[in-house]
Image (spheres, rainbow, N blue to C red):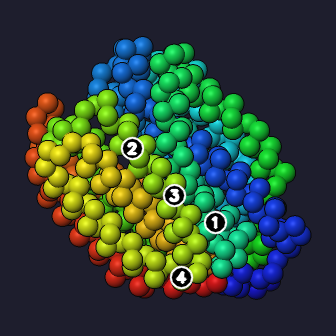
Amino acid sequence: MAATSAVDPPIPHRPESGAAGRRGVILFTLAALQFISIVDFMIVMPLGPHLLADLGIDAREFSWVVSAYTLAAGVAGLMAAPWLDRVSRKTAYLVLSVGLLAGTAACGLATSYPWLLAARCVTGGFGGVLGGLSLAIVADVFPPERRGRATGTLMLAFAVASVAGVPLGILLGARHGWQAPFFALAALGLPLIGLAAWSLPSLAAHLDGPRRHPVAQLLDTLTVPAHRRAVALIALLMIGAFAVIPFISTFLVANVGVTELQLPVVFIAGGLLTLLTTPIVGRLVDRHGAITVFRGIVPLSAVMMLVLTQLPRVGIAVAAPVVAVLMASNAGRMVTAMSMITSSIEPRRRGGFMSVNAAVQHVASGVGTTLGGMIVEGGAGEPLLHFGTVGMLAAGATIASLWLAARIQAVD
């Protein structure tokens, strides 16, 4: 049989009967499981003092607990890429969801450093691939004219995690032990897997094309020109963002006059603004096109990187809105970028590509953090030096993404 057309055909796998309600349930399920995955990733960092005391580990070992998730996600994304387009989206999603929740529960059950490290690798491996597959499902289920809003809704999971998930997790950890947030997340995820099994169509139209050897399929995924441009775009955006993001808290406390007790207020403000603006960005994408909206948001994001990294000692009254606008603009550029990217990949290749794309995101975020760490100095009770230089690097990478985005072409 001939390979599937680059343009999505009117396939029966899309839920056309009662489409609006069915799509709404699907999107809620994807976003809710994405919320669990993001909170699982983020909650480890504020639980650090509890983990160090309970497991008897030092700061170096704790850093491996944090990085194990992203490293495992990157490796798993590349390993899964050749296989995701060889099974139905529904089957792959359910397997990955079960793996994510099993890894999350294993984190709560961990009684030693090696056990926790292994559990974080399992969670990262399944959770990292799950995020990319969720975007592929959105592209398969929602037609192009509705895809921007759907992508924006899915990516709201990060804002909700920042505003509600992580603070509630910290509270649970403080009152009932650091294991409690992991058990709570696993319990919340179980009914969502049942909802996914009920609501998701099989989404197997991409299987109609000829089968290829997994290695050949992976090489094909990595060498298609459209794929290379899309990967380069997402890598540049992630490097720009993560050169700055990991050092924001340290900079605000050491240089800007924000106290550690005020930090949650800063990030809650950012999460709330992101909650407000992300759906608006999604609607603008559907109305005016992703590239047009991207060109409007990217310069704002670059300017806010420069403003934040050059802040003098101004306190929370100035720092909170600056960080909030930066967070919201970063989220907006990711919504527009992912809308462009998913529309530029042939449906029969979306699953594998989005797995590679997720792997690249994790690796690029690590590269950005490393670059930032090589430039800044101080921070341990002293002012953070050269953060302005990091801001210029991040802003330059962000502006450069405009050139790459102009070369992303939609296929549906």
Residue indicated by mark 3: 276
Q: Quadrant of residue 294?
A: bottom left
Mark 1 / mark 2, whichever is N-terminal: 1
The amino acid sitting under disc 2 is: Phe
- Residue 178, image x and y in percent? 49, 21
- Residue 298, image x and y in percent? 36, 72
Comparing labels 4 and 2, the label whose residue is closer to the camera: 2
Comparing labels 1 and 3, the label whose residue is closer to the camera: 3
Separation (CA) of disc 1 from disc 2: 24 Å
Residue indicated by mark 4: 289
- Residue at 82% over, 68% down: 19
Residues at discs 4 and 3 in contact (Cβ within 8 Å): no
For residue 267, which numbered disc appears in the image?
A: 2
Separation (CA) of disc 4 from disc 2: 30 Å
Q: Is residue 6 left or right of residue 406?
A: right
- Residue 312, image x and y in percent? 13, 49
Residue indicated by mark 1: 150
The amino acid sitting under disc 4 is: Gly
SS type, badge 1 = helix
Comparing labels 4 and 3, the label whose residue is closer to the camera: 3
Which quadrant does the N terminus fall into?
Answer: bottom right
Mark 2 / mark 3, whichever is N-terminal: 2
Mark 4 / mark 2, whichever is N-terminal: 2
Residues at discs 2 and 3 in contact (Cβ within 8 Å): no
Separation (CA) of disc 1 from disc 4: 14 Å
Q: Residues within 10 Å of mark 2 (few under 14, many from 20)?
A: many
SS type, badge 4 = loop
- Residue at 14% over, 44% down: 313
